[in-house]
Amino acid sequence: MNEKLTAIELFVIEAVKKRRKIRNMTTRALSESIGLEESFVGLVENPKTRTKYNLNHLNEIAKILNCSLADFLPSSPLPENCIKEYKEIQGKKSVF
């Protein structure tokens, strides 16, 4: 598992990547289509960075890829404790 991202963050990134590739769209093209720097999607997909999508990004990406926001989420909850993972990654006792 990537030590910089939680299981749910990785799931979302992979779901977007899969749909992007089905549409034969480059990371640069998707970044530009949603109005962000050309390197944004590439940074998100790079496992060495903590860059990730937020709901605003996903909403715009869903429009471009002609799909639902739900298409980027698992059909049932992941077994991992993502809050615990997030705390460990961030080195925090509480998350607000």
Image (spheres, rainbow, N blue to C red):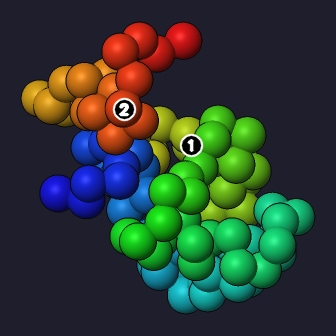
Q: Which residue is mark 2?
A: 91
Q: Which residue appears farthest toward the right when viewing the image?
A: 35
Secondary element at image label 1: loop
Q: Mark 2 is on which residue type?
A: Gly
What amino acid type is highlighted by mark number 1? Ser
Q: Residue 68, which numbered label?
A: 1
The quarter in which the C terminus is drawn is top right
Taking the image as shown, residue 38 lies to the left or right of residue 16, namely right
The reply to whether residue 70 is visible in this rendering is yes
Residue in view at x 82 percent, y 73 percent = 37
Which of the image's four quarters has the N terminus?
A: bottom left
- Please provide percent x and percent y for residue 51: 56, 58
Q: Earlier in the sequence, mark 1 or mark 2?
A: 1
Q: Is residue 91 left or right of residue 52?
A: left
| Tag 1 near tag 2, CB within 8 Å | no
Total numbered badges shown on the rendered structure: 2
Q: 88 and 12: which one is in front?
A: 88
**Mark 1, other Cα within 10 Å: few <14 / some 14–19 / many ≥20:** few
Q: Nearer the viewer, mark 1 or mark 2?
A: 2
Q: Percent x, y for residue 2?
A: 25, 59
In the foreground, 56 or 94: 94
Residue 46 locus on image (x, y percent): 45, 74
At a point 47% along the width and 80% down the height, the residue shown is 21
Q: Is residue 75 visible?
A: no
Separation of residues labelled 1 and 2 (CA atoms) = 33 Å
Q: Residue at x 41, y 12 (%)?
A: 94
